[in-house]
Image (cartoon, rainbow, N blue to C red):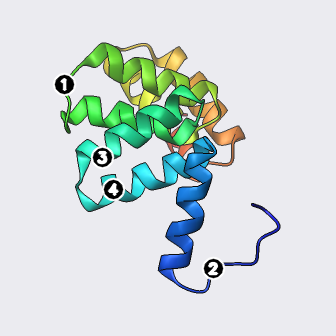
Amino acid sequence: FCRHPLSKDDEESNTNIMRRIEANDPHAMGHMGKRHWDEGDYGTAFEYLSKAAALGDAMSHFILGHMYSWGQCVETDKKKRLLHLEEAAIAGHPYARQSLAYDEQENERMDRAMKHLIIAANLGYDKAIQMLKECY
């Protein structure tokens, strides 16, 4: 797929993404899930994101964590939210680290919150750097 020329229109792009999904490409599944999530089609988004997360896509874990937090197409579930955010953070998703840092701050575990922010900053997330500056 990486050697194909760029798509000329949306229809061709969708066809290419669907081919990648049929080949079990987790990034393509996550991309399609995020697209549906952005459009408010949470049921379809949940299906694509669940499959992509099972294949290890960090962004999909992050979005699923928020779906469980906000009750979008699923019951609100703090344990599943935390599980997906932790999986996303382990896979290197800096926004997941920031979300975990907020959770640790709310639970008054500042040392753990700082560790999450330091890791997010090392991943290049500028907002984490600003948050660390405010803490010191």
Which kind of residue does numbered mark 4 sit on? His
Residue at 51% x, 47% y is 29
Q: Nearer the viewer, mark 4 or mark 3?
A: 3
The x and y percentages for residue 94 are 57, 40
Residue where numbered disc 4 is placed: 36
Q: Position of residue 76 (x, y in %)?
A: 19, 24
Q: CA distance from mark 4 to mark 2?
A: 20 Å
Residue 105, by quadrant, is top left
Q: Counting residues from the N terminus, which is met first, the one under dot 4 or under dot 2?
A: 2
User: Rounded to the nearest whole Å, what is the CA distance between mark 1 and mark 4?
Assistant: 20 Å
Q: Nearer the viewer, mark 2 or mark 1?
A: 2
Tell me where residue 18 appears, x and y as whole percent: 53, 58
Verify CB contact (< 8 Å) between mark 4 and mark 3: yes
Residue shown at 60% from the left, 40% from the top = 24
Residue 44 bears which disc, if any? 3
Give the structural element (helix, strand or loop) at label 3. Answer: helix
User: What's the CA distance linking mark 4 and mark 3?
Assistant: 7 Å
Residue 81: x, y in percent?
34, 23
Assign the N terminus to one quadrant of the image: bottom right
Which mark is first along the chain, 1 or 3?
3
The residue located at (32%, 52%) in the rendering is 37
Residue type at mark 3: give it: Thr
